[in-house]
Image (spheres, rainbow, N blue to C red):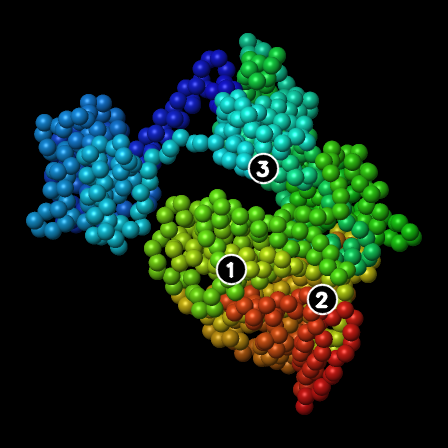
Amino acid sequence: MDDSDTDESDGSGNEDASNTSNSESSEDEDGPGDNGSATQSNQATANDQGQGEMENSVSPDPSLSPEADNDDSHEGEEKSPTTPSTAEEPTENQPLTEAQDVMYDPEDNTGNNGGFDGEEENDTDESSFDFIKEQIETDDGDNVHYGNLVATYILRQDWNSNNAHPRKKEAHEWATGWRERYPSSINSIVPQPRPQPKMPETKFGFKVPKTLKDIKRLDEEIASSAVLTSLLKQQKVKSWFAATKKEIDKLILYGCFETEDTKEPVRSGYQKMPCHFVFDVKPDTGGGIILKARFVAGGHRVDSEGIPKYLSTIDLTTVRIALTDARKNGQRVLQGDLSNGYIHAPTVEKVYFTLDEWWGSLSGMRAYCVKALYGLAGSAHAFGEYVKRQMFSIGFHQCEQDPDCWLRRENYGGTDLWTRCLFYVDDFLLTSTQPELVYEEIKNVFEIKFCEEPVLYLGADINDDHGFMTMSAKTYILETLKNLEETLKVTVRKMRRPMNPLAHPELDSSPLLDEENKRLFQHITGVLNWLVTLCRIDIAFATMSLQRFCSSPREGHLKLAIEAMGWLKSTPTWRLYINENDLAGFPQVDPTVFSEMAKRYVGIEEIHSTRDQVPLGLGGEITIFVDSDYAHDLVTRRSVTGIIVLYCGTPIYWHSKRQTRVGGSTYEVEFMACKTASEVAHVARRLLRSMGIPVQGHARILGDNLGMIQSATLAASALKKKALGVAYHMCREGVAMKAMLFYKVRSQENIADALTKALSGPVLTGLISRLSPLTPQQLSVDVSQDERSVELTGQSSSMDTGSDAYDIVEDT
């Protein structure tokens, strides 16, 4: 629905739409915003510095100067000849006011536009293109700054088309030659042609309407195509018209608004807003196609100050913990989706719109919103409050550390366990001994679209492999690759590694990307980031390295991003295992390690919340791998920290990030990394307690720097560097309160090494494979205690399923 379709008959909406259209057209031709004042300021600066070599020669005719278009805003000011500034080079978003006013005036209807648009040129050649070239290419040399402005403006126009005026083509040829002559100063500025009218997008063979006016024509195309008709054969909605009417009927059925005759005065405090429809095509699980229409409110066009807008979602760390605990305690998992989520929630926003002819008998009525329509600023928050009320009504309560995890104590078969329901907006996971019984209760307070065994959750494929639940991103990866290769025409070759070990994106000096490729780079890095969040630990470092350049990416960065997608194309089936087995084989720790440290930190205790849940079930242990790469960034010399956290044998959290300051030595950056690991350990333990999961023993933190581990573990170890005081005492306090202990692991066996640097394919695969419970590995662990250390050699703890085949070797 267009803005004009929903406005009242007073014509205000049409005027708004017209003004918007005019302003958009003006921005396309003149550049965004009014830069007259800035131009004058730059000119004055240039004159003061003696850089105005073009003084009084750019636009001798006052009608062609920038001030001529801004008489209203400069009344009473003395007009001065325009002198271009040479203080700064033009950027991609900089309005080209000087060149534009000389080259082309879009408001000039006389045909005298620099000899380009009229049949005849001006009588005077002062505004002709030949005159402009003379001012740029002088006998004393080229005026590079002014030439850049003019050439950039020309290249942004569509002056090279077949039907363009010959003088425009001549100007385009000159601008192209100028760009080749001075590539360093103008190469980053990309031609921006005027936008063409939007054509209907095609998805799965169906053209998607842009507005309601497209529906009739596209429905006729569907009716005349046997292929498209067959795809909709099993669906109730067989046309875009039917999809639109279905959405309208749904909004009326759920009472989303109150209607009133437009002759009545508008209710106090209410604001008028535009509304429209958006359309989409989605595949059906049965192999068919679903045509969807969604009515969207123009909430961005009204004042929403003071309206709460925030809606939290479940953290995937919580999801992985809940799945692991369910497997450990013999619970089952169901996945569901709430139907028509937002429109069940009441809204507090005071907005209204006018119904058009598509609303049948309600056409011409004024509609006051009473439900949280899609598009309103506060709809997400209103839906969150609605979920809270419904869940409280059936006896659930929120987890303190993650409020989107809902808990209820159950007793099925004589065992007390926690039933958990985890919400990601309208998607939910349910873990319980009898999930079907809980589902029936939830169905009484929510309208549920489906509830079944988990198969695809937030883009992650849920499968079973040798009795272990697994999470992979195969479907998401293949769909993304298909979109890149078929729609965006990007060639993605299979790669043997996520990133070249010799690559350093911070040193890249290739040209900046144009706007189109910049958006492509941002799209790819967004995909990579979500894949890391889901389960792909192996691309965490590559993603971290590239994401920092999203605002100003270069050609080399885009190449590296495509190579990372090539690695995913080679390994789409990599899986993260939900391994409920505890890690076995760690040595018994001498209790004096904790008692001696407690003497140094008298009275230190781990903080427990009064809202911690009663621990039920078996519980598990926390193991953390931590590593750092010293001075990895060759520009800032900052180091990189890598962390992987395991609950039982399941990776639940991982972290690859540059450190916030430069470290003076390997010892220092390793200590800073272990400080971060100790913070993560405290958070993980608090999260487990708030979910009602027993926390077994202390968190084991495995690093590969023996000096740092001894300083953090041995009570007699002294602080060697004052700059490390915070990290030093934070790690030792964690030991004193028996919350954690630090272990030494060999560098080549430290899984976190994969998150600190770019590795070759075989090395990366060897490290990441240690997270699989199906791959036998070897792991060596040292625990420093006073003057002796204990070394363990045997089955990898992250792969172990109960074996205790470790040899203890005493080192004197």
Q: Residue furthest front?
A: 226
Mark 2 burial class by Cα count in 10 Å: few <14, some 14-19, many 20+? many
Q: Residue sitting at 64 percent across and 81 percent down?
A: 716
Residue that label 2 marks: 773
Q: Residue furthest bottom?
A: 812
| Mark number, residue 309 | 3
Mark 3 burial class by Cα count in 10 Å: few <14, some 14-19, many 20+? some
In front here: 688 or 365?
A: 365
Task: Residue 739: give x, y in percent of width and height.
Answer: 71, 67
In front here: 247 or 676?
A: 247
Task: Residue 581: give x, y in percent of width and height.
Answer: 77, 65
Q: Is residue 685 visible?
A: no
Kindly report which numbered mark, 3 or 2, lies closer to the viewer in this rendering. 2
Decide which of tag 3 and tag 1 comes sooner along the chain.
3
Kindly report which numbered mark, 3 or 1, lies closer to the viewer in this rendering. 1
Residue that label 1 marks: 494
Q: Is residue 372 left or right of residue 488?
A: right
Which amino acid type is shown beneath numbered disc 1? Lys
Task: Residue 715: give x, y in percent of width and height.
Answer: 66, 78
Mark 1: which secondary structure?
Answer: loop
Residue 545 drawn above or below residue 71: below
